[in-house]
Image (cartoon, coloured by chain):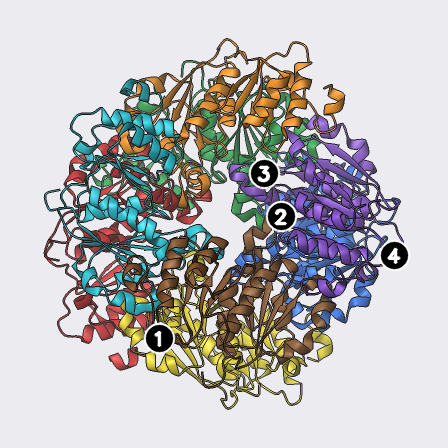
Chain colours: A purple, B green, C orange, D red, E cyan, F brown, G yellow, H blue
């Protein structure tokens, strides 16, 4: 499908990579697989993209549609993330540490880590270090203190980012998740807790927004020339 | 003023102490000083109260009105608490540890501690041990582990109760406070965080409800015969 | 599956039983059956657990996955609770009374009662004693007054805990449920009512959090040595 | 001031009494004392009003302004209610019982009772019978069962109306009040509890709306010919 | 099934009809069909019920289960209401007018009307008279003014009850419905509008609570001896 | 089906077109396909409708039911809109520009555009011009400045209407959509942003209400004689 | 004060009148009187303004500060609006009808009417025609049907705009006000009702935003050449 | 006052500067001037602080109390910020651009800028460049593109951060403010808009939290060695 046809429902932003320094992402939720496939075809027809395009919040039907058009795209079903071309760039800049409070937060953490990787940063992923057992996060202080930025992913009470921010000099990008029930209100409790972190140095993104957190982390940890 | 006159606006509950095991409290907010004075007079005219009556959320005009009727009552302005008779009973039962995350949470913590004392429990008060500097709460573990119940008072992100509950075997009574601004929404953020504590063993009371927390703590730490 | 493999997505907390006095629980919601099975295998490979591990909010697929690994685990489908080893310890400590306002609240009440049992407490369960027919709860006063702690489970208007707290000397652990519709707002109405109980002595946990209530009750009713 | 001048800011509804069977009320909040005085003058200039006009939520400055124009008007400062002519009609119809959970709810209860009286009903007022001490409301069952309608005024947990509705055959008009703090959210907790009353027969009006409750009660208890 | 077995999950309230003057209702939502069938069997085994028992919010599986036990029960699928015995009593008392703003509100209106009928009142049902076309409601004024009580069922903006209340002397029972989308917030918009009706005489029940509205209407329109 | 039968659940408003100048619309959500088909039949039986009737929020089963009765009706599945007769009138009046921030907002934008067309206005549709790439909307300024009214459809942050309103003299009708996740709260974030637009000239309609926006736009852009 | 000094805290937008067709407005709330005076001075120093500048939500101290700089400015204290130069332009375009539901809504209605006047439109103001007495609004139909746009200002239940929109062909700009108490939630109830108006043709602006409504009305009623 | 006395209400965190790399801040709101003065005295008595201590949200009475103890402290009343020692360090690291959408947002922007300065960063402040006049922000692109991080402060619709993030490669720290009224809900509208920014690269902090934004910006723009 050519750009002409795509322009009926999408306005591609080819120069964004130039203007912003980071390639475009396609938000799949709320789009039909056909629409996403059309966008994928238009992207595939461009010569020399200067970085991978990411398709975020891609459900399996979206993935199938994109892989029909760009067969070598990489799909991470947990993170609901598609990338094309499939290989991330060589990592440059500072370390991005991604920390998930619980196993249930892993999918969002993975989305953040992969996004940072595709935007060119080295990363490490730490899982299941919630505040109910402090020794777990304290046991990873060495890693956390080496990071240029720490992404902390947590649901329920959202208490982990403030604890981490009190322990490291790097900025913390906090991602509330919809993990929990009842008065968790689909992530609202964690979101509010993070916005009110009593330690300074906590930046908050939308609930379950692993992509946004990874993007921010990549910008913060960008090499000096960026 | 006799009970007769008081009955126009208040129905005293003389037997509550017998029925419940704990004496009555008078909630002053929303009552006029005159109404509170009338209630105080009725209480003062009873013979042999088996415990102190507490007047909670008592503003200075309430205090003045009560002291006009019961001159030996004790008023703690920080805790907004009046007690009559002024001396708490001899402490029995387990230790009540009361922990305030920040200096701004002190008034509510004090209300909890005094309530527990007037209901007959020994208590200790620990202040300014918020999670932004973990070493502060970790430095008090000995005390916390000696307690039969820990009352934890915190505003903003409300993260301290879940951290404490992960460290001690005793139940934690969590009191969210209205300390904070913006997305703290007058204590809502802390309240939700506490209800979603990822460590079990956290019981929550209303925002700024130091009295309720102290009462619960006194019940939990009651001696075996209670 | 060995701990090594599990550590990719979960950080086991083997010493928690030592540190806290109560064994660990695994929150299943938001985890895949495979993840839960992996955790179960790791738990099964430990020698001499000093108490049953509970798997909470376990849907049938979680149960099936765990039973594949720990065939003698016990699954209570109503309470969505798995326990392994399957036998609760000999009960010690005070009586835990669990009260459900309506039949629809029974599943949550059962989760609370079983949790208390697996944490070592004797319990009794009372059902369908909502405030719309006061004689029902008044008819159980003898039982309620024998309890060291009363767990009260109620949806809709959430009025039962405050009524019970006014009748007994023991602390009340109130569990709002999502039973109701419209302005019940999935349990919010009951939650707010319980937080504003006009009788003191009411501790609130998250909506539908039977596990948390049972855990708190077990801590409150713990024998003196605990 | 003549109707002509008043018509610049108010459109009087002279026929309402004819059309609806009940006289008009003037909502004072948000109006200046001058505006209210102008309306009062217009009302005073009419011949033969077939019932008292009520001025609701009238602050002292409103009262002063009205009394300057209609010197024999009656002002009840607690209920924030002005009535002119000052004498209520002879009571007809069924009994309106007005019940206030606590002393702090008295002002709203009084507004309801006086409204019912000015609309022509006999009433009785019962105070401080909250559910924390059930014997208090149970002690008034005879009165409550004689009533054609019961108005129940309560803040905090708003539990009283559902308890009363479970005890009497008459419909209950429930008035949540803004009494309370924290998670009472200015009466929201009580409002939601009342809307979710587990006993049928509970009709809810706006928070602190004693006038509306009294009006409804007067309609419900109207004599057969109404 | 005998009462003995039922008592494991439900406490029947046989005397409620005597105490309250109206028979019991069984709320089916949140109960399993088996539980509901057990309750139905217990009800069927009683001699001489003095009125029909209603099963509210009964989904088809509930209906099937009850009809298996009480084959002559009547099920109205639109209103989700089961009644046994199937015939309503002879109507006595005043007329209950039930008004639905739109066709989408019909199911709730029908639940209200049938409830009033089973509690012994005559009723008339008026549909699709929303305020967007005022001539429709104005064309029914004769009927509305004959009613002892008017039940008004409306979603979206919830404007109809206040318009009706301004036109008739009878009290209005307003039922917000979850009809609408977006900022209707599942009936919240209509609920708030009704609570703030600028005409007095509007009593509000829970969103979609046709049963509650019909019950209230039956109480309000009860014959003098009730 | 004749009007007689329909009147059991719907009160047609035949004169609305005369009274208001615009034909009636039938809101399908919450109605059964059978009810909608009945209404369609009644509409089809009228002589000389002076404009197309629209069926809004029509799911495929509604469409099938209507097409069974009015086989030449036009169904736009994206916009969930049915129209009969199928041809819009000749366009008159000013240009309606409809702008969708993202591809995911297209369905709502299309509903707005088609509604304006069926109410007689010329329109142009512009897609995927969100504020994250300002050059896209700036590239369409010529079109936007020719419009008599601009409908702007946006989800997530809802920032586009305020940007457009700052660039054109025409009024902007802003339609928040439920596109987004987490703290988008089903369109609430966009709705609030639009209500607080810092540029004047922004009129807001309900979330996802393309029909309402198209109707308003048609009224605003009506020819002078309207 | 020269533009130079002002640029420390405000960036004037001199060309807005050219770009948008309407002059600039200065939002005073949240600015100090000194800041507003500085802006006023900068505006006064421009030659040939092509229309009046409005200062909105101007409290008396703001007014005093502006009048110190621009002594011939006009201040309307009710509407909290300052205008300079003080005379509105000759009215052109269609009639703007401004309708206030109650006397308490008058200040916001006045702000809307004056804004429309200063932007060049003829207007008429109608007061106290709320839906509780329908004859009042029905008595003004002639005027309403002559208008090119109707601004409807209402608090509490916000029911008036939907009623008006059902009666006239012109678009309705609905302004919710913060008039009311309790569950009015500072205008939220009226706002939601208006967003869910069951009649099409209702455009909503922010709570109490008379300026925005007047501006929109002026744009909608602009003469053909605008 | 010595540390001994202070320890009654505050636990100083002397090593925080070492541990985190940034000096401590004292949150004044909710503390009495006496408490703040006590903390100031303790800070002043330490030897060799390695950076300025900030006192945030300091009202004039707090400032007076601190200046009584540390007379050379610097108080910025607009930013409600006290600093001691009064001179910020020599700036190192990348440029922090602070952008305020409107004049009313200036105080919060100033708090952010000063915080960044005291934490050692160079900054530039840009004011009144809201999206209603896009040319204003577009005119500052050169500056914005030179920044290592951009802090964007905006109230009302909160649209500016997403626009800026779409134009620059640096991360954006978005600060919603409580500027606005009605449906701005004290900054909630802006907060939600920022959390849902359709451009990636937006990190959000609490409403009005200029201190937090400045701290984050200082961390992000820290020199490589940090």
Q: Nearer the viewer, mark 4 or mark 1?
A: 4
Between tags 1 and 2, which lies in front?
Answer: 1
Rendering coords of residue A44 (x, y %): 80, 55
Report the residue marked by disc 2. Answer: H28
Discs 4 and 3 lie in a common subunit: no
> Residue H170 falls in which quadrant of the image?
bottom right
Residue A181 versus residue E99 in the image, above or below: above
Q: Chain of mark 2?
A: H
* Residue C165 locus on image (x, y percent): 37, 28
Q: CA distance from mark 1 to mark 2?
A: 48 Å
Q: Residue at x 77, y 30 (%)?
A: A140
Helix, strand or loop for disc 4:
loop
Residue appearing at x 72%, y 68% in the figure: F136
Q: Quadrant of residue G33?
A: bottom right
Instruction: Name the residue carrying label 1.
Output: G127
Q: Which mark is residue A48?
A: 4
Q: Secondary structure at mark 2?
A: loop
In the image, A222: left or right of E178? right
Do the numbered discs 3 and 2 sit on residues whose CB atoms are within 8 Å?
Answer: no
Q: Are there few (<14), some (14-19), or many (20+) residues within 10 Å of tag 2?
A: many
């Amino acid at each position: 499908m050519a750009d002409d046809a795509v322009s009926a429902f999408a306005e591609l932003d080819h120069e964004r990579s130039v203007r912003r320094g980071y390639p475009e992402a396609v938000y799949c939720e709320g789009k039909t697989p056909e629409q996403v496939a059309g966008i994928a075809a238009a992207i595939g027809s461009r010569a020399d993209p200067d970085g991978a395009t990411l398709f975020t919040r891609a459900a399996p039907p979206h993935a199938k549609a994109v892989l029909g058009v760009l067969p070598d795209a990489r799909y991470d079903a947990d993170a609901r993330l598609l990338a094309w071309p499939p290989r991330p760039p060589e990592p440059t800049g500072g370390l991005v540490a991604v920390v998930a409070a619980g196993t249930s937060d892993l999918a969002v953490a993975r989305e953040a880590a992969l996004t940072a990787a595709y935007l060119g940063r080295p990363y490490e992923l730490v899982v299941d270090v919630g505040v109910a057992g402090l020794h777990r996060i304290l046991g990873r202080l060495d890693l956390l203190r080496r990071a240029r930025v720490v992404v902390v992913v947590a649901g329920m009470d959202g208490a982990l980012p403030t604890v981490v921010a009190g322990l490291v000099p790097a900025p913390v990008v906090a991602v509330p998740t919809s993990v929990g029930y009842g008065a968790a209100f689909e992530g609202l409790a964690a979101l509010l807790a993070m916005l009110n972190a009593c330690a300074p140095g906590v930046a908050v993104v939308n609930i379950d927004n692993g992509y946004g957190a990874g993007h921010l982390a990549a910008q913060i940890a960008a090499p000096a020339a960026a």
